[in-house]
Image (cartoon, grey):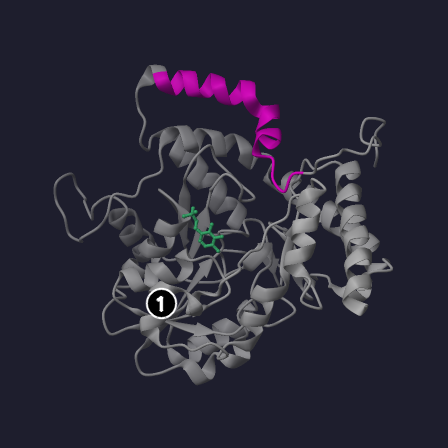
């Protein structure tokens, strides 16, 4: 719905505006910060416990354990299963770096699998041929806020006795076959980086578990493997969620569904307008796979005809923000060249990296801003397609 204020076309449309999302809870947050400041308990404490309870409930899991970041969540998940030297872990290449770096940091080998071109998520049909006697785990990523095909992935994992770790950093609140993200695997990993669907005022993360022993290991590992105090049964790390972040996030948990609904409404408007656009033939729109509940951390289109970078630059000049997530697949990153995965070996991943463009979709984006983003995209494409055809 367009309010009077919204109907004035804005000249600049940001890709993200974290401040706008945080503004409505400013007073509540600052008051809680002041209380914590005066109490002087800055690590753990009741705010962390409360957030863990809220996230566990929302994700339909028994256990949730705060940690320092989504990247650490992935590291802790692998550590909980003693994954390291000599082990292989199946991951997509079309994802954020941390999915694979956690594997490599532990001395294990990331084994990259290509994606489904429609969902952008790991293609379960391609997993089989990458499984070896050394394969220990699969890390499906729920990219852009949509769950990977977890039923198919879990079937494979069961057959080969593999651990499954969900990278749900972009997907809190998403569902697959009515099951929430993080509830469909051994360990779920969440990030509270400020631009994620549940974002803090700094770094933060969480691991979820359905098994008590795994949860116990995760909690120990995140605190130097220590329990009780100064008794170390495991070699853990320091990865704790700080109290300020937990307090902020616990307040925001009240709104996490509302945020996702606003993103879904923005996605629906993009779909209907771009779907009917005269320029539709130059675009491929993202979609919600059957049985999924997509929470749209990103609205990621494909721009065809090799026009993506020019379109992006043109939109930037017109004041409309966009971003390429991700321009270089992980198997082509310099630091992963030792794995020997050559150019051309993951064709769908490489094609996506060349075509994708993420448009503004944050919950507080106004209808006028969204319309302006679409107008600018359309006029840019109209101009470029003419020169491309000429
Ligand atoms: C953001 C993100 C991470 C890492 O989370 P941080 O909290 O930034 O460490 C991991 N995987 C994916 C897919 C992400 O988007």
244 versus 225 height, above or below: above
Q: Is residue 242 visible?
A: yes
Residue 186, image x, y percentages: 40, 62
Residue occupying image coordinates x 41% and y 49%: 70
Residue 304, image x, y percentages: 71, 67
| 369 left or right, relative to 300 | right
Q: Which residue does the numbered mark 1 point to in the structure image?
A: 336
Which secondary structure class fits the magenta region best?
helix
Task: Say which of 264 and 233 sits in front.
Answer: 264
292 versus 257 height, above or below: below
Residues in magenta, as a range = 14-37
Task: Say which of 249 and 213 sits in front.
Answer: 249
Residue 72, image x, y percentages: 34, 50
**Quarter holding the C terminus?**
bottom right
| 233 left or right, relative to 33 | left
Residue 94, image x, y percentages: 51, 65
Task: Say which of 352 and 32 sits in front.
Answer: 352
**Quarter holding the N terminus?**
top right
Answer with the quarter of the image where residue 242 lies. Answer: top left
């Amino acid at each position: 719905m367009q309010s009077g204020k919204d109907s004035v076309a804005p000249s600049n449309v940001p890709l993200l505006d974290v401040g706008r999302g945080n503004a409505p809870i400013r007073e509540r947050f600052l008051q809680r910060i002041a209380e914590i400041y005066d109490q002087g308990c800055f690590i753990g404490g009741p705010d962390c416990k409360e957030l863990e309870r809220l996230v566990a409930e929302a994700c339909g899991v028994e256990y949730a354990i705060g940690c320092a970041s989504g990247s650490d969540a992935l590291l802790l998940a692998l550590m909980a299963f003693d994954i390291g030297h000599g082990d292989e872990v199946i991951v997509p290449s079309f994802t954020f770096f941390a999915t694979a770096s956690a594997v490599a940091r532990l001395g294990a080998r990331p084994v990259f699998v290509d994606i489904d071109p429609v969902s952008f998520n790991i293609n379960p049909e391609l997993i089989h041929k990458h499984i070896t006697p050394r394969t220990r785990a699969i890390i499906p990523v729920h990219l852009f806020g949509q769950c990977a095909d977890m039923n198919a992935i879990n079937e494979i994992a069961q057959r080969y006795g593999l651990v499954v770790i969900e990278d749900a950093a972009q997907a809190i609140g998403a569902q697959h076959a009515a099951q929430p993200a993080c509830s469909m695997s051994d360990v779920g990993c969440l990030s509270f980086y400020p631009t994620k669907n549940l974002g803090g005022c700094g770094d933060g993360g969480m691991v979820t578990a359905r098994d008590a022993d795994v949860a116990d290991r995760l909690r120990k590992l995140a605190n130097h493997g220590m329990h009780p105090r100064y008794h170390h049964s495991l070699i853990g790390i320091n990865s704790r969620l700080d109290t300020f972040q937990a307090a902020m996030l616990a307040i925001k948990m009240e709104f996490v569904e509302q945020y996702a609904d606003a993103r879904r409404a923005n996605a629906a408007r993009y779909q209907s307008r771009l779907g009917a656009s005269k320029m539709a033939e130059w675009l491929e729109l993202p979609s919600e796979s059957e049985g999924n509940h997509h929470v749209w951390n990103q609205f990621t289109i494909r721009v065809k005809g090799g026009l993506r970078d020019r379109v992006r630059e043109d939109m930037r000049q017109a004041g409309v923000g966009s971003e390429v997530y991700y321009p270089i697949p992980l198997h082509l990153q310099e630091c992963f060249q030792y794995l020997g995965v050559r150019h051309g070996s993951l064709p769908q991943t490489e094609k996506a990296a060349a075509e994708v463009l993420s448009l503004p979709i944050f919950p507080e984006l106004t209808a006028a801003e969204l319309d302006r983003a679409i107008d600018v995209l359309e006029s840019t494409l109209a101009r470029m397609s003419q020169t491309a055809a000429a």
